[in-house]
Image: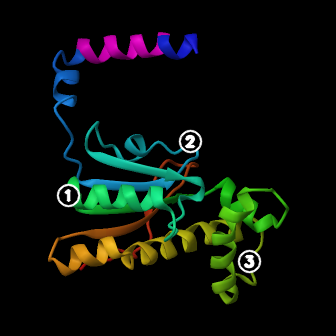
Amino acid sequence: MKQIFEKNRIWVAGKNQNDPHFFERLSKGQTPEYLFIGCSDSRVPANEITGTDFGETFVHRNIANLIVHTDISLLSTLQYAVEMLKVRHIIVCGHYGCGGIIASLDNKDLGLIDNWLRNIRDIARIHKGELENLKGVELERKMVELNVIEGVYRLSTTSIVQSAWHRGIHLEIHGLVYDMHDGLLKDLGVSLGE
């Protein structure tokens, strides 16, 4: 932990040197345009891969960037982002090489996390026809994409999003995949709006 505090002090000094009013502005509140729903994977930092600055992106992360209608943490984040922060774009972002996707395909007994991964296995069952001839990395990559596509659809059916659209609020949901091999985001072309 000592290293964390040392790096924090260095980071603060650098921010203050570049912009003496940075923390003063940051402390006055946030008005993000985006809600980023991504994987908990430490290699997928939302602000960095989207090139957004502090205060521009509200973030929710969980294993395999799942959208589950009973996830109170996700739904609370979504409601706060849409109703209080007035975000206009929701990004569901998966990433190739996702450990949650890979673990769900292995069908091994992993304990408690199996309950969470059940959601990914259900996606595989629903899309069985698209997946039956795929193997290895090709299967993993397709599952990452299908998980995002299903996530976009599931988000669009939440009462929070439906209510926003019903009230005429401009809100769009986008499905993206991050590729760690080249650092680029891929648009899956599944954006939904009112």
Badge number at residue 133: none
- Magenta stretch encompasses residue 89: no
SS for tag 1?
A: loop
Q: Amino acid at mark 1?
A: Lys
Number of marks drawn? 3
Splitting the image into 4 quarters, where does residue 175 fall? bottom left
Horizontal relation, residue 64 to residue 57: left or right: right
What label does residue 86 carry, if any?
1
Q: 193 or 49, which is in the foreground?
A: 193
The residue positioned 18% from the left and 15% from the top of the image is 20
Query: What is the C-alpha distance between the residues marked 1 and 3?
Result: 41 Å
Characterize the local packing of mark 3: few (<14), some (14-19) or many (20 or more) Cα atoms within 10 angstroms: few
Which stretch is magenta? Answer: 6-17
Q: Amino acid at mark 2?
A: Arg
Q: Which residue does the numbered mark 2 point to in the structure image?
A: 43
x 18%, y 71%: residue: 170
- Tag 2: Cα neighbours inside 10 Å, few (<14), some, or many (≥20)? few
Amino acid at pointer 3: Leu
| Residue 149 x %, y % | 49, 74
Q: Secondary structure at mark 2?
A: loop
Residue labelled with disc 3: 134
- Asked which secondary structure carries label 3, the reply is loop
Pointer 1 and pointer 3: residues touching (CB < 8 Å)? Answer: no
Q: Nearer the viewer, mark 1 or mark 3?
A: 1
Q: Earlier in the sequence, mark 3 or mark 2?
A: 2
Q: Height in image: 67 above or below 133?
A: above
Of circles 3 and 2, which is in front? Answer: 2
